[in-house]
Amino acid sequence: MKVLIAGAGSVGRSIAHDLLEHGHEVLLMDNSPGSMRVAQVAEAEWMLADACELAALREAAVETMDVVVAATGDDKANLVISFLAKTEFGVPRTVARVNNPRNEWMYDAQWGVDVAVSTPRIMTAMVEEAVAVGDLVKVFTFHQSGASIVEVTLPPDSPVVGALLREIQWPSEIVLSCIMRSDRTISPSPEDTLEARDELLFVISAEADPEALAAVLRTPLTATSPTD
């Protein structure tokens, strides 16, 4: 992918490092000369310019980008960058950083935001996850579709511990997307077995009922398995 990251602070540079390690092309843009720490992310392209200005975005050929990441420390700037990227250049996907949780309500499709990432919200979710094993924790929401990523840590007394995934009938419009087990990340297959303390990540559509998922995780397997 070709990715423009607007905001070359510590957050933007960290994102750039990860994307470059995964083989993507990255352009870092910032309007502050002090942020031009090119040597720290030497593999990326750099541009000293204001991503809130159409001229700068045209010079960066934003219309050729697959993703624009608005990662500045200013929520107003992140919204403007997302809006311009989506409406003026038709960028397929925008990801915007939320600095102040009180502004999160504005990060929606009207402002051209596909995914809003709120560090305080994610940290809260991780705290809740650490103290509430077995509870569903919403990590974030895709504003365009209304779908959510939900995490649950499987308690040892869950009836589905030890079950094969093919034996479990998940509710409609709820998909198990990842199993995290110790230091392993597992892409689920029908023959995988759930274990106690597995961290399960689900994609839940806007129409789905999260309580139906909670019920599956609490109900003996014989009651949730498909009929033979």
Image (cartoon, grey):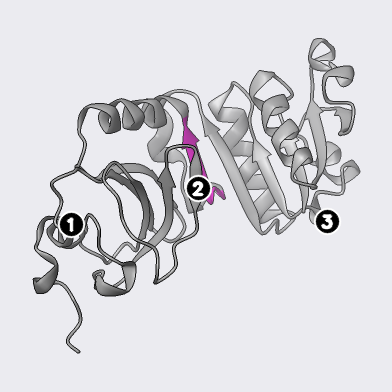
- In the displayed structure, would residue 35 be above or below residue 60? above
Secondary structure type for disc 3: helix
Which residue is nearer to you in this view: 168 or 140? 168
Residue 74 visible within the image: yes
Please say if the residues under marks 2 and 3 sit with CB atoms less than 8 Å apart.
Answer: no
Q: Is residue 221 left or right of residue 186?
A: left
Counting residues from the start of the chain, the first of labels 2 and 3 encountered is: 3
- Kind of residue indicated by mark 1: Leu
Residue receiving disc 3: 64
Mark 2–mark 1 Cα distance, whole angstroms, equals 20 Å
Viewer-side label of 1, 3: 1
Mark 1–mark 3 Cα distance, whole angstroms, equals 44 Å
Residue 113 among magenta residues: yes
Near mark 2 (Cα within 10 A), the count class, few <14, some 14-19 or many ≥20, is few
- Kind of residue indicated by mark 2: Thr
Residue found 88% across the figure and 30% down from its top: 46
Residue found 39% across the figure and 63% down from its top: 192
Counting residues from the start of the chain, the first of labels 1 and 3 encountered is: 3
Which residue is nearer to you in this view: 50 or 165? 165
Q: Which residues are magenta?
A: 112-118
Residue receiving disc 2: 185
Which residue is nearer to you in this view: 53 or 51? 51
Q: Is residue 118 left or right of residue 69?
A: left
Q: Give the label on residue 188, or none.
A: none
Quarter holding residue 124: top left
Secondary structure type for disc 2: strand
Which residue is nearer to you in this view: 138 or 33? 138
Residue found 86% across the figure and 34% down from its top: 44
- Kind of residue indicated by mark 3: Thr
Residue 52 visible within the image: no
Residue receiving disc 1: 217
Near mark 1 (Cα within 10 A), the count class, few <14, some 14-19 or many ≥20, is many
